[in-house]
Amino acid sequence: MPKMGDTEELTLENVAKLVQSIQTSLEVSNQNMTQMNQNMAEMNLNMVQMKSDIINTVSDTTANMVKQEISNLKESFGNTIVKVNKNVKENTVKTQHNSNTIHELVKKDKRNNLILYNFPCTGNWRERETAVLSLFQDTMQTSCTSKDIDFIKNLRKTPNPPVLVGLTTWRMKMEILNKRKNLKDSKISLDEDYTPEVVKKRKQLRATMKSLKEGGLKNVQLRHAMLYVDGKPWNEDSKDDISNVPGSSNLNNMQKLQPRSSKKHLSLLSQNKVSSPRQKSNKRNREGDLTLSLQKNKSTKLTQPLMVDFLSDARASVSSDHSLSQTDSDSEDLVSLGAAQCDKNLMDKTLVPDDSADVTSPNDSFNSVMEKSAVDMEE
């Protein structure tokens, strides 16, 4: 049997070994735990990185998807806008074409029409036709017959309304328009059947024409939808050039003008207007009459009343025609200049009766001025 001491020694030794073995195992376990903790930390980092990568990937994908969708929407919207603009342009062209077509149809429909104003036209169609024919044939002296009239109707249901007369030909319409001067002694007037656009334009131009005439311009005419000043078309750009148009100054200002060279004045006026053959013929006739009058009165002793009568006749002969041209206005200005010079000489000297010898000086002055005016006109 073993001894008690040996058993205990063996036991303690074994215990020591066992404890050492346990310590070793614990150290290994601790190392393993530390390694596991490190691995867990790395795993956590990896998970965080993976999470971030997933989020970024999802965000980039979503952003790209959104951008692609926006791009698709822009492209679709752009194509839609292009189509809409194309349709709008086509519709605008069609509308303008239709508007022009309608305007031409209305213009064509009104082409042969006339409107009578202040014309007492009552009764049935036959009575109105008889009244209109009487006006055209008897009063206006035209060749219009019942075959030339298409229709007659009142434009409004009011007393004495405007009367619309439709003619069968444009030629007859123009013949009647050319004879409307025969209505100047009556209250009846007639005009063309204008389109609404032309009526509106003419209303504006009438106010402008009134302003121009009040400003001193005499030869201002309204033809269709255009103003003419001294035979030249007038527009808004012509406002600054009104002062250059002969006759545009006020009559009160013309009385204040100082006498100047007639020849120079005529040369300045002739720069703005070229006379037609008819105007030149009228000018030569007036010049011949004025020269003949001067020759007849050259040896006559003119008293102040005779001189005033002569000047009045000269002015009347120049301004008798309502359609004065630029050359006619020049002649009238020339006579006015001669009259102004004569009036100046008359203010300086006193006229005496016909049988007095002292009348020679003012008469000679008057005759010399008028002779010089006639020579300037001939030149």
Image (spheres, rainbow, N blue to C red):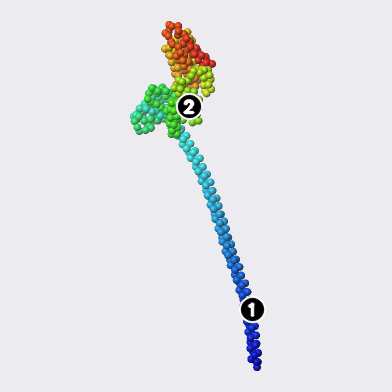
Q: Sequence-wise, which precedes: disc 2 or disc 1?
A: 1
Image vertical order of residue 115 relative to residue 349, above or below:
below
Q: Is residue 194 visible?
A: no
Task: Pick the residue in front: 133 or 347.
Answer: 347
Image vertical order of residue 317 relative to residue 104, above or below:
above
Give the alpha-carbon distance from disc 2 to disc 1, as whole Å: 127 Å
Residue 201 at x, y percent in the picture? 45, 32
Residue at 38 percent of width and 22 percent of height: 185
Task: Pick the residue in front: 104 or 76.
Answer: 76
Residue at 63 percent of width and 74 percent of height: 31
Q: Secondary structure at mark 2?
A: strand
Few, some or many residues within 10 Å of mark 2 (<14, 14–19, 20+): some
Q: Amino acid at mark 2?
A: Tyr
Residue behind mark 2: 228
Residue at 49 percent of width and 38 percent of height: 97
Q: Is residue 343 visible?
A: yes
Which quadrant of the structure image shows residue 177? top left
Image vertical order of residue 34 relative to residue 347, above or below:
below
Task: Pick the residue in front: 333 or 261.
Answer: 261
Q: Secondary structure at mark 1?
A: helix
Residue 222 at x, y percent in the picture? 45, 27
Question: Quick one: quadrant of the N terminus?
Answer: bottom right
Residue 299 at x, y percent in the picture? 47, 8
Q: Are marks 2 and 1 in contact (CB under 8 Å)?
A: no
Q: Is residue 12 left or right of residue 239?
A: right
Residue behind mark 1: 24
